[in-house]
Image (cartoon, rainbow, N blue to C red):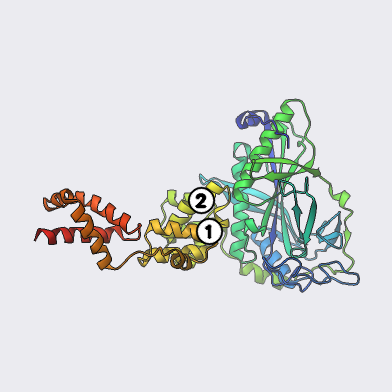
Amino acid sequence: MAKDRLLDFDEALELFEPVLGFEVHVELSTKTKMFSDAPNEFGSLPNTNVSPVCLGLPGSLPVVNGQAVRYSISLGLALGCEIAPSSRFARKNYFYPDLAKNYQISQFDEPIAFEGSVDVELSDGTIVTVPIERAHMEEDAGKLTHVGGSTGRIQGAEYSLVDYNRAGVPLVEIVTKPIYGAEHRAPEIAKAYVATIRDIVVSLGISEAKMERGNLRCDANVSLRPRGQEKLGTRTETKNVNSLRSVERAVRYEIQRQAAILKGGGTITQETRHWHEDTGATSAGRPKSDADDYRYFPEPDLLPVEPSLELIEELRAALPEPPAARRRRLKAEWGFTDLEFQDVVNGGLLTEITETVTAGATPQAARKWWTGEISRLANAQGVEASSLVEPAQVAALTRLVDDGTLTDKLARQVLEGVIAGEGTPQEVVDKRGLAVVSDDGALIAAIDEALLSQPDVLAKIKDGKVQAAGAVIGAVMKAMKGQADAARVRELVLERAAAVEE
């Protein structure tokens, strides 16, 4: 892949105005798929969660999932949208190797929700209102695995395998209107917007929204227009970006790449693009089709969706608090300072910490582990922190620290074991033998040996120079392979030194 020429970000923004748009796909956590009774489960063996409808077998007919419709209405209401009294499904015709019937059932000109907006809070507290054009229901496609080659993509692959487990999973696609005025904060707005959508769907309980699993994916549209020009520039659509960090980086990259082309007198191709996490770059996909190219027509096998006013009002009354209000409440409940809470928000870790606290951890312990060691490991691997460990596992780890089973140092080793797939925190402790030595007899034996081997240190402690005890504590901790409580060791060192003095 040829390396793109990039223009300095600040220079790009001096010459051009960025215009953004986002299409966020949210997989709904229903028990069955959008149009069939096949299970909607993650992680099953390939091609086991299928039915005749999923496989496009002749004579099979779709049936709308009522729970998916309720979830879609709830999401539309949470986005401030109008709910259509009647919406219709359509067939979107395209070459779909991962949809056996070779078309997708989606919604085209009659979506279930339209004309909304969502407030997005940036790192300094600035509120940006993002206009929502529509939120429509559709089905997900299957998953292709390209075998051979070095990139895992179809280019250079020897052959491809298809798993239809995801085919037919309920989706809501949220489409924004063009976002103007983003300027230098365009990458930050992109990240904050997707994080806000994630917070909304999690609080609604309609999706796990795990980006690393593809539960929530973002297509990021970017175009540039010369300063003072009213006509919009040609846009590109970076497809299926699956982490908050990547959304931010992809938008920045596209601004710099397009600016370099336009400054050099070139033109932008309207196309989809792929994001490469390893190189931090996008690459060309296919020419981007317009709606007419998909030959939409009404789905003949499905009736229009016509929710009652009573149902809409029932779902409206059940909406959770808006994300901004929820953040203010959690900050107060957790007792975080402005800086502590901003670290959580900027790290996109609000959901993880909330779930960790719900699982039994204290807010400060949850914040400490997610913004500290877990984020450090995630950054080193170039992945999202949420992809490394589950909140329940972090809560279990903090309990082992709280009850004295682990020190912080040992807990970091246990965390590495959990991330490596060695089991729960307790299972890692048992397998690796990492529990703190709580037997005072074993500690006293190690302390006595250390005191006898360092008579000069013992003499200093006798003279009241208690800071000298550090040398003995260090020797004991080394002898115990770090599996001792340093505070308890210090107490015993001073007690034993006093005993020798007597």
Disc 2 residue type (three-letter): Leu
- In the picture of the structure, the residue carrying the numbered disc 2 is 377
Sequence-wise, the earlier of marks 2 and 1 is: 2
The one of 175 and 82 positioned closer to us in this rendering: 175
Q: Residue drawn at (26%, 63%), measured in percent from left and top? A: 443
Answer left or right for 433 relative to 93: left
The one of 93 and 300 positioned closer to us in this rendering: 93
**Residue 496 seen in the figure:** yes
- In the picture of the structure, the residue carrying the numbered disc 1 is 419
Spot occupied by residue 382 in the image (x, y as percentages of width and height): 57, 47
Q: Is residue 392 above or below residue 119?
A: below
Q: Residues within 10 Å of mark 1 (few under 14, many from 20)?
A: some
Spot occupied by residue 362 in the image (x, y as percentages of width and height): 42, 63
Disc 1 residue type (three-letter): Ile
Spot occupied by residue 12 in the image (x, y as percentages of width and height): 65, 30
**Residue 332 seen in the figure:** no
Q: Is residue 233 above or below residue 305?
A: above
The one of 47 and 327 positioned closer to us in this rendering: 47
Q: Residues within 10 Å of mark 2 (few under 14, many from 20)?
A: some
Q: Residue drawn at (80%, 65%), measured in percent from left and top? A: 86
- Asked if the residue at tag 1 contacts the one at tag 2, i.e. Cβ–Cβ closer than 8 Å, the answer is yes
Judged from the image, the secondary structure of the residue bearing numbered disc 2 is helix
